[in-house]
Image: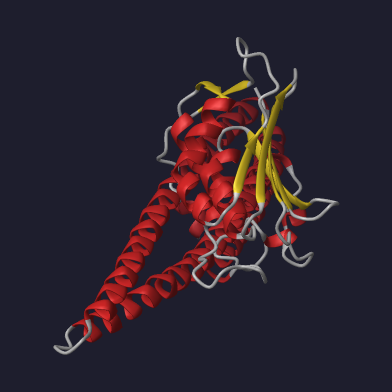
Amino acid sequence: MKILRNPEIKQSLLCHLFLTALAVSLGLLHDATTGLLLLSFSFLYIALHYAFTWIRYQKLNQLSHELDAMLHNNTPVRFEKYQEGELSILENELSKMTLRLREQALALSNDKKLLADSMADISHQIRSPLTASNLILTLLREQDLPVLRRKQLLQELTQLLSRIDWLVESLLKMSKMDAGTVLFQHEPISVPKLVQNASEPLLIPMELREQSLSIENHYDLSNPPQFLGDLSWTTEAVLNILKNCMEHTPAGGNIQVSFSQNAIFTEIIIEDNGPGFDPEDLPHLFERFYKGKNSLDHSVGIGLAFARMIVTSQNGTLKAENRPEGGARFILKFYP
């Protein structure tokens, strides 16, 4: 029998037989009837004890097979069948384990799908400018190409290479954040300085577009609004939001930045007077690689997703909405 392969069962059986022999011997010293009664009751006890033990082992064996089927075939285990003593304790622990395993399996499945989708999107986003660059290089090889046309092509090639460089750098940063390898600083950040750092790279492009940037400065200069975070990463987040506003604001438009602080949070509001968001796009604006109906042709849909990743990683929130008077509004909140 398989049950006798268990060393504990063998030891307990030997112990029971020894005690039976001892009891029967003591009974026979009294009289034969007592000895026979003790022998009968001892063998009955041993038979019942190992019968129940065998039933318990059968249930454990069945549970083992069901767990194996669950792990390999995704078959659910009916724990309600195991409701006795140590099996109840084992059932409770196994129930927790199987729940964790299912959650982990679901998370891994979702991560695998997200990785596949992301790789497909990344390949597409990089392939487009690379294809255009190869085409331009083919045109530049022409010997009789006019000088003006050559300059135009070189300018287009430079823009494409800059776009590829920005795309690859952004994707690498997002990958680092996904992997949890980014260590954010936890230092006081002056909001006016943050806005200034983020807006400086865009001042010339905005000037070329005849756009204006208005920054609210109604605050105590000796005690400007601030919050705890990483200045470098947060600057990149605000830069991406300002860049999005700039690209969707018409010539002669205005981008406004205001900020405030209270006992609960520090708030930064960035607004423009462009066309705003399509209502169908609002729930998806911060999804990676999502391109709204009003997005530009060269947009890749990672700027706003990247901005939200940075903000939320620093105990903040970022949401977007349409202004009642028209245009887009981004609201950033940083909590202590």
The one nearer the camera, 12 or 38, is 12
Q: Quadrant of residue 282?
A: bottom right
Residue ID at (61%, 63%): 66
Q: Is residue 40 above or below residue 222?
A: below
Q: Quadrant of residue 68?
A: bottom right
User: Number of marks in the image?
Assistant: 0
Q: How is the image coloured?
A: secondary structure
What is the x, y in percent for residue 239? 52, 44
Q: Quadrant of residue 86?
A: top right
Do we see residue 54 in this rendering?
Answer: no
What is the x, y in percent for residue 21? 55, 35
Do we see residue 203 in this rendering?
Answer: yes
Residue ID at (74%, 22%): 264
Q: Is residue 205 above or below residue 89?
A: below
What is the x, y in percent for residue 272? 69, 50
Left or right of 185 on screen, residue 252? right
**Quadrant location, the C terminus:** top right
The one nearer the camera, 56 or 275, is 275
